């Protein structure tokens, strides 16, 4: 099994910053990518940003130039630096990792428990 532990959420005023962290542990042979998704009340879960094992990054258009994903592949860790936060960024943020447990195994998606980010004055 694989566990993803997120940290760093909280309440912040509009224009403020937060940094989310996620660490993957457990039966890990390799990770092809780690990313962040978010889900606001009444909305579907959406992709925020992805960091691949080759250190490539992808960001949703809604967060480009404000959020930056980074990672440490050796530590199975991914970060999300969120700047210039807006009320519409309020959501539960989930960490995702695509993990292979063995050399011959297939990749499986795992999810963290989620961390609440609230942007409000």
Image (tube, rainbow, N blue to C red):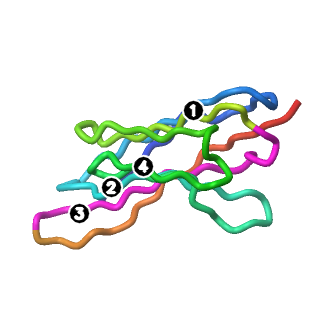
Name the residue beneath numbered marker 3.
100
At x 31%, y 36%, the residue is 72
Q: Earlier in the sequence, mark 1 or mark 2?
A: 2
Which label sits in the foreground, 1 or 4?
4
23 left or right, relative to 41: left
How packed is label 1: few (under 14 Cα within 10 Å), some, or many (20 or more)?
Answer: some
Asked if the residue under mark 4 is in contact with the one under mark 1, i.e. CB atoms within 8 Å, the reply is no
Q: Residues within 10 Å of mark 4 (few under 14, many from 20)?
A: some
Compute the Cα span from label 4 to label 2: 23 Å
Quadrant of the rendered image containing residue 103: bottom left
Quarter of the figure with the N terminus: bottom left
- Disc 3 to disc 1, C-alpha distance: 26 Å
Q: Marks 4 and 3, Cα distance to the nearest angstrom?
A: 20 Å
Mark 2 nearby-residue class (10 Å; few <14, some 14–19, many ≥20): some
State the extent of the magenta-drawn residues as a range: 86-103
Q: Which of the pair 36/54 is nearer the observer?
A: 54
First along the sequence among labels 3 and 1: 1
Mark 4 or mark 2: whose residue is earlier in sequence: 2
Residue position marked by numbered label 2 in the rendering: 2
Q: In this picture, is 43 found above or below 65?
A: below
């Amino acid at each position: 099994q694989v566990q993803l532990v997120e940290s760093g959420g909280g309440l912040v005023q509009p224009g403020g910053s937060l940094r989310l962290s996620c660490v993957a542990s457990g039966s890990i042979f390799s990770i092809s990518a780690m990313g962040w998704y978010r889900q606001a009340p009444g909305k579907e879960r959406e992709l925020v940003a992805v960091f691949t094992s080759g250190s490539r990054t992808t960001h949703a258009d809604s967060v480009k130039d404000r959020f930056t994903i980074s990672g440490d592949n050796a530590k199975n860790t991914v970060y999300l630096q969120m700047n210039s936060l807006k009320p519409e960024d309020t959501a539960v943020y989930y960490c995702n990792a695509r993990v292979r447990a063995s050399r011959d195994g297939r990749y499986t998606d795992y999810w963290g428990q989620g961390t609440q980010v609230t942007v409000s004055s």
